[in-house]
Image (tube, rainbow, N blue to C red):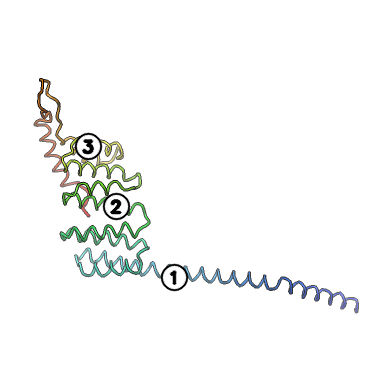
Amino acid sequence: MPAYDHEEQDQIEELKAWWVRWGTPITAVVVAAAVVVVGYQGWRWWSARHALEASALYAAVDAASGSKDMAKAKDAVADLTDRYARTGYAARAELVYAKMLYDAGDHKAALAQLDGAVEHTSEDALKAIARYRIAQIHIDDGQYDAALAALDAAHPPSFDGMFADLRGDALAAAGRNADARKAYQTALAKLDAKSPYRNYVQLKLDSLPVRAQAAAQGGTNVSVAGTASAAVAGSAAAAATATAPVKP
C-alpha cells in the first residue's frame, strides 16, 4: 500500500509540473475558442436582425411603389441607404425608387438614385441594370454621349446583347446610322438565338436608312431602303411600343 501511495504521489507531482508549464497556454486557447464561438453566434444573430430590418424597409419601398406614395418611398430608401447601404436591399430599393422618379418626370433625381445603386451594390448584375437604365434616361434626354459612356462600363457577358442594342438606339438617335447598324448586328450576335427579343432588334436594324453610292460620276448617295424600309420602320415603331424594355 505505501508503494502505491508513493506512485500516486509521483503522478500528482508530475501533473502539477505539467500544469505549471502548459496550464496558461491551454487556458488561453480555451478562452480564445470560447470567444470565437460566442462572437460568431453573436455575428449571426446581428446579421439576421440586420437583414430582417433591411428587408422590412425594402418591402415598404415596394408597397409605396404600388400605391405611388413618393414620400413613403423616399423616407424608406433614405433609411435603407443610411443604415443598411451594404445590404442587397439598398440597391434594389434605389432601383424601384428611381423608376418612380422617372415615371414622375424627375429624370435628374432618378439618375441620382441609379448612381447610388451602382455605388451601394457589390453585385455585378445590379450594377449592369442600373447602368442600363442610366443610359436609357440619357437617351431620352438627348444626352447620347453620356448614354454611350454608361454603356462602356464593365458588365457581365449575359448583358452584352442588351447593352449593344441600347448602344444602337443611342447611335441611331444621334444620327450615326453606320455605327448603329454595327451595334445592332453585335446585339443580334450576342442575343440567344431563341430569344423573341431578337425580332425587335432586327426590326430596328432593318429600319435604318441604307444608302449606296450612285453609279454616275460624282453621283450623290441615294436611299435604297425604299418603301419596304418605310414599312419596316412602321413595324419597328409598333414593336417598340409593345415590346421595348421597361424604362427605369
Name the foreground residue: 171 vs 156. Answer: 171
Q: Is 85 left, or right, of 112 in this rendering?
A: right
SS at circle 2: helix
Residue position for label 2: 129
Quadrant the N terminus occupies = bottom right
Q: CA distance from mark 3 to mark 2?
A: 23 Å
Residue 31 % position (x, y): 61, 72
Q: Sequence order check: which comes first, mark 1 or mark 2?
A: 1
Q: Sequence order check: which comes first, mark 1 or mark 3?
A: 1
SS at circle 3: helix
Whether residues under marks 1 and 3 lie with C-beta atoms below 8 angstroms apart, the answer is: no
Query: 10 Å neighbourhood of mark 1: few (<14), some, or many (≥20)?
Result: few
Callout 2, which amino acid? Ile
Position of residue 211 relative to residue 215, above or below, is below
Residue position for label 3: 179
Q: Residue furthest top?
A: 216
Whether residues under marks 1 and 2 lie with C-beta atoms below 8 angstroms apart, the answer is: no
The mark lying in front, picked from 1 and 3, is 3
Q: CA distance from mark 1 to mark 3?
A: 52 Å
Residue 42 % position (x, y): 49, 71
Q: CA distance from mark 1 to mark 2?
A: 30 Å
Q: Residue at x 12, y 21 (%)?
A: 215
Q: Which mark is residue 101?
A: none
Callout 3, which amino acid? Asp
Residue position for label 1: 46
Q: Answer with the quarter of the image where residue 106 lies.
A: bottom left
